[in-house]
Amino acid sequence: MPELPDVEGFRRVFAEHAAGARVRDVDVLDAQVLRGVAPARLRSVVRGRRFGEPARHGKWLIAPVAGDGEALLLHFGMTGSLVWDGEDRPRHRHDRVVFTFAEGELRYRDMRKLTGLRLARDETESRAALGDLGPDALSVSRDELGRLLGGLRRRTKSALTDQSVLAGLGNLLADEILWRAKLSPHRAAAGLSRGDLGRLHARMGTVLRQSVEAGRVPPRPSWLTGRRDEPSASCPRCGTTLCRGRVDGRSTVWCPRCQPT
DNA sequence: CCTAATGTTTGTGC
DNA sequence: AGCACAAACATTAG
C-alpha cells in the first residue's frame, strides 16, 4: 500500500502527535524490522529524547531526534503503516515497534516485514542509508522531469517507478498517472515528446495532490485505481475493456484505446 | 497446495 | 553500462 501519499499521511500522523514530544520508551516487539541497529541501541538513543519535525523523501519518512543529529528512517514496504493510539488500547498483532509518549503511543505496524526502520547517526549516514534517491515526485518541475527521463530507453513505467530516477511513485500511482496522461506504460521514456512530458508532469501533479490529501491513492470509480481490481474492468473514460499485463514484474493495467503504443 | 499482493535488493544474461 | 527478468525477503488471503 504505501506510496508517496500514504507516507505523507504517516508524516502528518507523526507531526501531529510525536514531533516535539519526549519519548518515554521504545518497545521493539519484533527486532526483525530493525535494519542495521540493535534494539538496545535504538532504545538507548531515542529514550528520553524529543523528536523533531518529520520530513519525507519519496517513500521514506525521516524523523530527526532532537540534539545530536541522529534520525530515525522509516520505510513501509508493501504493508506498513504508522498509527497513533492510546497506551491503554490493545496492540495490533502486526505492531513491530512502539514509541510511547505521555499522551499515547506511535506504532510502526507491518504485516510482511519487507523493509523496516533504520537509525542514522548524522546527515551523512542518513544520506547513505537512503541510497541514491531521485528528486521527490511531488516537487519535481516539468523541465526536471524531462531531464530525468530523457535518454532512458527503458519503458516509461519502469523509469517512473525507479526510486533512483524519481522518488515516491509505486505501482498504483504509475498506472494511474500514465492512464491520465494517455501514455502507454510500454513506451520508451526517451521517446516521449514535449507534449507527452508536459501532460505527464501535469497529470502527475494532479494525481499526487489529490492522493496526498486523501493519504492514499483513492480508489474512486472515476480513477483507474478504483477499477483495477474488478475482474473485467472497463476504462472510466472511454468504456473500453482494460488490458492487464506485467511490466517490470509488476501487475500493470492500461486502456488500449486511451493509451496506444 | 498454489498464486498473487501497492516494495526493494541482488544476481544473471543479453 | 543499460535494460529486462527472476528470485529472494515474510506474511496473509483467496
Image (cartoon, coloured by chain):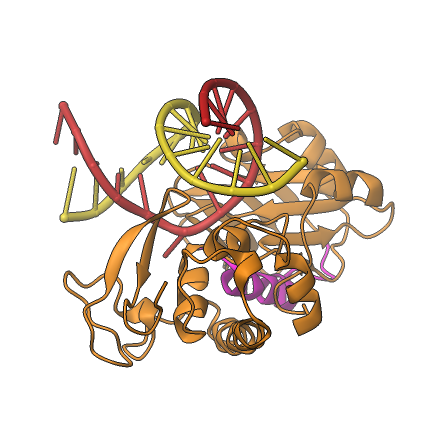
Chain colours: A orange, B red, C yellow
A123 with respect to A183 (left or right): right
> Residue drawn 81% across and 52% down?
A66
Q: Main secondary structure of the magenta part?
A: helix
Position of A53 relative to A73 (above/below): below
Question: Does A223 appear above or below A58?
Answer: below
Residue situated in front as seen by the camera: C3 or A212: C3
* On screen, residue A155 above or below A220: above
> In the rendered image, which quarter contains the C terminus of chain A?
bottom left
Q: Nearer the viewer, residue A79 or A231?
A: A231
Residue A129 in magenta?
Answer: no
Q: Can residue A141 be seen here?
A: no
Residue A9 lies in the magenta stretch: yes
* Segment colored magenta: A1-22
Q: Determine the residue positioned at 66% across, 29% down.
A: A36
Q: Which residue is rendered at x = 20% and y = 72% of the image? A: A234
Which quadrant does the N terminus of chain A fall into?
bottom left
Residue drawn at the location 19% of the way across and 67% of the way down: A233
Residue A237 visible: yes
From the viewer's perspective, is A83 left or right of C10?
A: right
Q: Position of residue A104 (x, y in %)?
A: 56, 58
Seen from the viewer's position, the closer of residues A30 and A116 is A116
